[in-house]
Amino acid sequence: MRSSQPPVVATWVLTRFCNRNEVLAGDLVEEYARGRTVVWYWRQVVMAILVGCGSEIRMHKLLTVRAVITGWAALILSSYLITLPLYKLYSRALGALGLGPLWFWWWHYYTYPIVFLPCVGGFLSGWLVARFHRTYRVAMVTMYVLSVALARFPEFFRLATNSVSNSRFVPYLVNYLLIESLFVVSILLGGLRSTNIETARSLK
């Protein structure tokens, strides 16, 4: 039997990423109660987020540029100060134990943790973008994520094209998608953490 309550996850995403727009949330809940489908509800949530972010980005172009620069600066600094030292430390630890090289991580379970090392910088960069752009944090973090995805696209395109003509590249493509997906999620979690804190404070 279909529940009269909308999907909990979709509602949670809406309240977190649409600047707590109670009017819009209420309208969507009413429409869902009248017989709209779950797919319709999710589509409206996604569209509301995209439209809201697009509007804020258009109205605050310089702020958007600053947010992207902030994110990339934080990412580059964290790569040199955190990610690279952690990678070297982990490499030395494996070497001391007589284990294999890190570049074949998908062959050995003990090298799996390295895929999470870049996520540290991703989380911090997302958090800083949201921290310094609190009023428009959702739009600014979204734009920063898009800039990261755009920077990674050429390599994805190369691997995808090679995988079509040669199946030998498929594992490399899967590896790349896994690492980049985790990285993007880490950025969103960093921004989301700031969003949750601000929401909690506003409710006090």
Image (cartoon, rainbow, N blue to C red):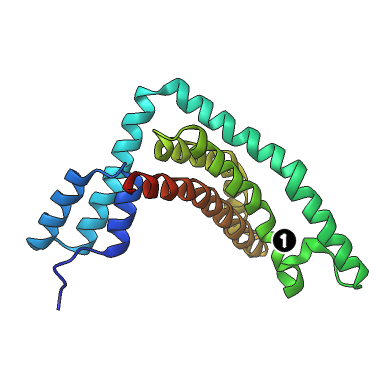
Left or right, residue 96 beside residue 51: right
Q: Is residue 108 visible?
A: no
* Residue that protrudes farthest toward the bottom in the picture: 1
Residue at numbered disc 1: 114
Left or right, residue 58 beside residue 190: left
Which residue is painted at 74% across and 66% down in the image? 105
Q: Is residue 8 above or below residue 125?
A: below
Image coordinates of residue 194 in percent, x first then y, are 47, 45
Q: Quadrant of residue 115?
A: bottom right
Q: Residues within 10 Å of mark 1 (few under 14, many from 20)?
A: some
What is the three-letter code of the residue carrying label 1?
Ile
Image coordinates of residue 150 in percent, x first then y, are 53, 39
Which residue is painted at 62% across and 53% down in the image? 119
Image coordinates of residue 10 in percent, x first then y, are 29, 58
Q: Quadrant of residue 72?
A: top right
Which residue is painted at 20% across and 50% down in the image? 25
Q: How many marks?
A: 1
Helix, strand or loop under label 1: helix
> In front here: 161 or 180?
180
Which residue is painted at 17% across and 63% down in the image? 37
Left or right, residue 23 beside residue 75: left
> In front here: 26 or 57?
26
